[in-house]
Image (cartoon, rainbow, N blue to C red):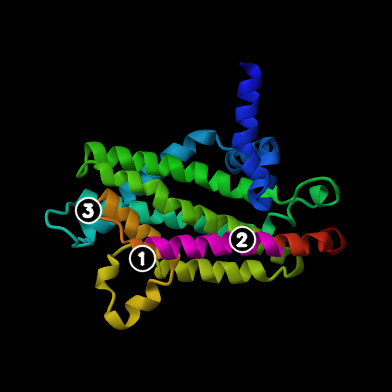
């Protein structure tokens, strides 16, 4: 029995070893887990509530969106009839959560390697896992936010339907995108220290290009195609469609998301591996 189980485990993980990117992460999964926990802990180090802020902050932001954009500014997506103030606030909350997942990684990526110079000088240490841990820490906070959003939709909003099962499928390429950007920017940040200034500008730019506070259908036709090149806009729009409005997934948009996310994932890893040998000399 034990031999059969061992053979099954070997067969189920053998394909991972054939994929350089995934295999490298899988072989170092214990280190990835340790550094993810460290990143989450450092974010809340010194605060009285500690990790409880991971729950409190999303609740505070949801309340802020409801009051500021729903009650005071009377905003709305105007996609389906009967939209309530809370529906609009939840839609903004979904958009901000998805944007935050990528933007948090994007903004912190330039400092991932230069902030761990002691590890760079250890020849055997797999530096590739540091950006992975950063993305997983951001994903941890994102999952808490989405859990709260799901509870809000279930008990206070329009409810959840089977369309909600599409959410992991929609978000997976955005996680690939975040990982690719983390590898790419963290590697470039070693050689070009000014890149942190550039990422700050682009983070703000993509905030306005992601249609967080309105539906993409309200973008004038002349600019809509340009806006829809932004994968975050597509990810936010598709997620809101399946969670808030119970609309089917646009397969063309989903295919674009997977193509963009997959290419960024592979390209970012390739650049990181190419630049990695020079890290120690520069630092």
Residue 264: in magenta span:
yes
| Quadrant of the image occupied by residue 189 | bottom right
Residue linked to disc 1: 252
Around disc 1, counting alpha carbons within 10 Å, would you say few (fewer than 14), some (14 to 19), or many (20 or more)? few
Residue 4: in magenta span:
no
Residue linked to disc 2: 266
Mark 2 or mark 1, earlier in chain: 1
Which one is in front in this view, the residue at disc 3 or the one at disc 2? 2
Mark 1 or mark 3, earlier in chain: 3
Magenta stretch, residue numbers: 254-271
Residue 44 percent across, percent down from the top left? 57, 40
Q: Secondary structure at mark 1?
A: helix
Q: CA distance from mark 1 to mark 3?
A: 19 Å
The residue located at (67%, 45%) in the rendering is: 23
Quarter in which the C terminus is drawn: bottom right
Q: Secondary structure at mark 3?
A: loop
The residue located at (61%, 23%) in the rendering is: 5
Relative horizontal placement of residue 19, taking residue 118 as reference (left or right): left
The residue located at (51%, 53%) in the rendering is: 175
Residue linked to disc 3: 245
Around disc 3, counting alpha carbons within 10 Å, would you say few (fewer than 14), some (14 to 19), or many (20 or more)? many
> Does any portion of residue 148 appear in the rendered image?
yes
| Quadrant of the image occupied by residue 34 | top right
Relative horizontal placement of residue 74, taking residue 199 as reference (left or right): left
Q: Main secondary structure of the magenta part?
A: helix
* Above or below for 11 versus 176: above
In this rendered view, identify the residue nearer to me: 30 or 252.
Answer: 252
């Amino acid at each position: 029995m034990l031999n059969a189980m061992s053979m099954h485990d070997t067969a189920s993980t053998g394909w991972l070893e054939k994929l350089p990117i995934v295999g490298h992460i899988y072989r170092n999964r214990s280190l990835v887990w340790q550094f993810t926990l460290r990143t989450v802990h450092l974010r809340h180090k010194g605060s009285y509530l500690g990790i409880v802020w991971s729950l409190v902050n999303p609740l505070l932001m949801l309340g802020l969106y409801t009051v500021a954009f729903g009650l005071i500014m009377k905003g709305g997506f105007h996609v389906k009839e009967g939209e309530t103030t809370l529906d609009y606030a939840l839609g903004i909350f979904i958009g901000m959560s998805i944007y935050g997942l990528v933007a948090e990684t994007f903004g912190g990526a330039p400092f991932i390697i230069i902030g761990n110079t002691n590890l760079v000088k250890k020849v055997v240490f797999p530096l590739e896992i540091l950006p992975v841990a950063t993305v997983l820490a951001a994903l941890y906070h994102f999952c808490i936010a989405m859990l709260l959003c799901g509870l809000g939709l279930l008990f206070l909003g329009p409810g959840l339907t089977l369309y909600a099962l599409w959410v992991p499928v929609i978000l997976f390429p955005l996680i690939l995108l975040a990982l690719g950007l983390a590898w790419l920017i963290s590697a470039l940040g070693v050689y070009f220290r000014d890149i942190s200034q550039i990422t700050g500008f682009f983070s703000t730019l993509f905030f306005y290009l992601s249609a967080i506070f309105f539906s993409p259908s309200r973008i004038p036709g002349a600019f809509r195609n340009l806006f829809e090149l932004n994968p975050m806009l597509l990810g936010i729009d598709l997620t809101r469609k399946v969670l808030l409005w119970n609309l089917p997934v646009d397969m063309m948009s989903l295919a674009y998301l997977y193509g963009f996310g997959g290419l960024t994932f592979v390209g970012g890893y390739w650049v990181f591996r190419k630049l990695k040998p020079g890290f120690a000399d520069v630092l």
